[in-house]
Amino acid sequence: MKTIFEKSKIGSKGVEIKKQNVPAYEFPEGYRRKDLDLPEVSEIEVVRHYTGLSRRAFGVDNGFYPLGSCTMKYNPKVNEEVAQMRGFTNIHPLQNEENAQGALKAMHILSEYLCEITGMDDITLQPAAGAHGEYTGLKLISKYHKARGDLKRNKIIVPDSAHGTNPASATLAGFEVINIKSDEEHGVDLEELKKVVGDDTAALMLTNPTTLGLFEKNIVKIAEIVHGAGGKLYYDGANLNAIMGVVRPGDMGFDVIHLNLHKTFSTPHGGGGPGSGPVGCKEEFACFLPGPKVEKYGEEYFLVNLPESMGKVGSFYGNFLVYLKALTYILTLGKEGIPYSAKCAVLNANYLKAKLQDKFDTEKDRHCMHEFVISIKKIKEETGVSAMDIAKAMIDGGVHPPTMYFPLIVDEALMFEPTETETKETLDEAIELLNDLHARAYSDPESLKTAPHNAVIRRPDEVMAARKPVLRYVKP
Amino acid sequence: MSHYVPHTEADIKAMLKDIGVKSKTELFSDVPKKLLLKELNIPEGITQQEVLEFMQKLADANTVYDVVLRGAGSYKHFLPSTVKNLSSRAEFVTAYTPYQAEISQGILQVIFEYQTMICNLTGMEVSNASVYNGASAAAEAILMCKERNKSKVIILGDIRPDTKSTIITYTEDQGLEILDIPLDKDLKGLKEALDDQVACVYVEQPGYLGNVIDAKEVGDIVKGSGAKYIMGCNPISLAILKSPGECGADIAVGDGQPLGLPLGFGGPYLGFMACTEKMMRKIPGRIVGETVDADGKKAYVLTLQAREQHIRRERALSNICSNQALCALTVTIYLSTIGKQGLIDVANECVNLSHYFKNELSKVQGVEFLEGEFFHEFVTITPGKVDAILSELNKVNILGGLKLDRDRILWCVTETVSKECLDFVVDLIRGVL
């Protein structure tokens, strides 16, 4: 499709701006810009253009999205309706507290519920995404150690199965990263862990269930080892959907956590954001949380800045309209709906795994949690068809590909997370599709290596994109 | 119990049977028994109707003002009807990050158009796909300028308090020292502070108190010292004010909220970031590039990923992963709809109305001002009368300017305020004084 710039015609206008009868003010010559290059397009052209582009996008509303680690569950419509209420969208972040009691109450209730669900004592809603939350959480740990004069603790331990944001966030928060290998079951290797913990350990960052979709069975021992050395335990909430309402990070021994409301709590991903990444913590870290915090005195809500707070990690109070959607979701599901959803997410993943494990290599001895990883290594050796080829061929089958080549510790990995909101029929269709692709890998591998065939483009040349970057439209 | 699980009891039975277990609980056999939670201590689930009633009550407990004369980082502008309508399309809203280019061309092209618009507005060569908000954009921009043996960062003039606080949070672990230098008349303070240890100078245009400066003059001085020049901008002002590119900036950042996003009690907004081609491989976050597919057809992909955390892990320049894609889409639709002339008109209306307001206020006995050029925000000084003015306005459902202290108010006038309303406010203030 042409870009909006190529549809521009000098003099076209999408909308007229109201002009008022006041004198014109002009800045001195040296202050004014020369030229402005923005599209000039009529309203119908704008509507057709972006409607056209929306048809070249694929969301959860379009079809099955088993993207591992991303929890692409259904995004309830009622959440969107709530986030569009005028009393939320049209309020200024700096209007007086007494004129924003509803907003502050919503923040307060959500904070309480999230604390209860995670087993934490306090929480901030300010971080705008998961990685932002990780950074904030690690800053909390840094502030905590420093405030105690424990200045040696500058190392964060990260398993080799972790998301890339974990080590990157640790560096940004001023820590040194120690990577540790996983054991045979892809969990934390306790002996390795014992070797690296010490009086310089600030924290261990862990995702549980792990990025392989397995529950970390040794979690209690891990917590003992890290705490025994004076370190703290950080919980990456990327995979909370498997266990929400079933087992709580706080009870497992975690001290600081972040959540991804755009995964676990059904707020939409929006094509890559806005997300929301609240950070919860145990009492001993609470005084360092970013400000301001919502506090309740009597029946009234106030914004309070704490003297020892780490300061801000972004503008105002974070992605307010996003976390309202999460509140709507939690209110809807309630105390039974939350664990029920987690259990059904695990049910769906295990069903999919059970039906695929005869043909595709995966963990067979244990039940998975909300997701599982299959390896295409053997198929690739036998047919030349890679994980990427299978993923691209799924597109022709009307299914969004699973996460590819992650976690890094599995060769030719494909990671499936069906979520609880998919029907058995949808899963059965995906199983049929994957079985068909498995057969075709052996009978007609070329058709997979050249997939997709029905998408609006074929595979793009990513090498050229990076070597000769074209990052904006320039008029010929 | 309400939930979004579509299974019937029969489905669940059949699935458990195929897995080979008796109950869902059996699937959790890896979880140590003593850790299993008995019950969540939150209310029972409620119906959609009840949820809507509950949330509507919360929404109604907030005051929605007829007129907003407060800005300070969040600006009420007119939103064309296309903006909400098109940006609510579920294909956009419910999609993931466009890593799978073949089924994400729509989202990738939107971001490509967004990047082009941000480049054109700022006069820069490279834009990313957005970051969390204006404050985090400023902090990330400063981190881009980190160089060996350069440990100082100059913040020139008044900047938004949230941005300042975020910058301090992000830089304090990186061995960077922040120097606050006031904007004095001949930029003497800046000239004195600039030495070979200064990594960058960050200035906001307009400044926190609305002031507009000759940003090119600052740029010339900064350039001469070898430090990088970062401008934080209100994007509406860029329609008429000299672009960061024209001022010699290396990086331009700002909050994109004024370009089509509602006040929303502070978020979600988006941070825009653009830089020179020279700094292209240092800019954080996702970037979309144009390429061709296997048939030679034009295609868009996420590119330059070698910078990013999922490739470089602890050696990445930033930890950023999610951006604010849907907000970037909203900005793109806003700018496409109002277009070149529309944005200039909006900027001029803001300037004209705010200058009219200030001029009318200057006729009121007892109102003083800070000196200097301004865009659409300015400060009044009315010793001891701030609370009285703001509370009188509140009574007639007008959100007055932001109280800075007991004497000063920071006002903001956008195209959403009518001349008649401004006349009314001037009379009201006259009455109070």
Image (cartoon, coloured by chain):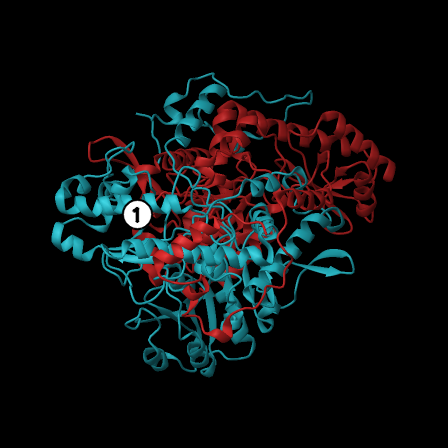
Residue A371: in sight, yes or no? no
Q: Colour of chain A?
A: cyan
Residue A45 lies, with reference to residue A448, above or below; the image says above
Assess disc 1: are there few (<14), some (14-19) or many (≥20) residues with their C-alpha within 10 Å of its C-alpha: some
Residue B296 quadrant: top left
Look at 50% across and 35% down and name the residue there.
B330
Quarter of the picture containing the C terminus of chain B is: top right
Residue B380 seen in this snapshot: yes
Q: Position of residue B162 (x, y in %)?
A: 59, 53
| A382 left or right, relative to B100 | left
Q: Position of residue B53 (x, y in %)?
A: 69, 43
- Please report the residue visible at 40 percent of the width from the left and 75 percent of the height from the top: A218
- Determine whether, in the image, residue B171 is placed left or right of residue A178: right
Per the image, label 1 sits on a secondary structure element best described as helix
Q: Is residue B285 left or right of residue B259?
A: left
Chain letter behind tag 1 = A
| Total numbered labels placed on residues in the image | 1
Q: Residue furthest top?
A: A11
Q: What residue is rendered at 18% in x and 46% in y?
A: A439
Q: Position of residue B368 (x, y in %)?
A: 76, 41
Which residue is at a point 41% across and 21% down the rendered structure image? A8
Would you place residue A409 above or below residue B211 in this image? below
Image x and y of residue A91, in percent: 67, 42
**Residue that numbered label 1 is attached to:** A431
Type of amino acid at the residue the image marks with label 1 = Ile
Residue toward you, A337 or A70: A337
Q: Is residue A449 above or below residue A382?
A: above
Q: Colour of chain B?
A: red
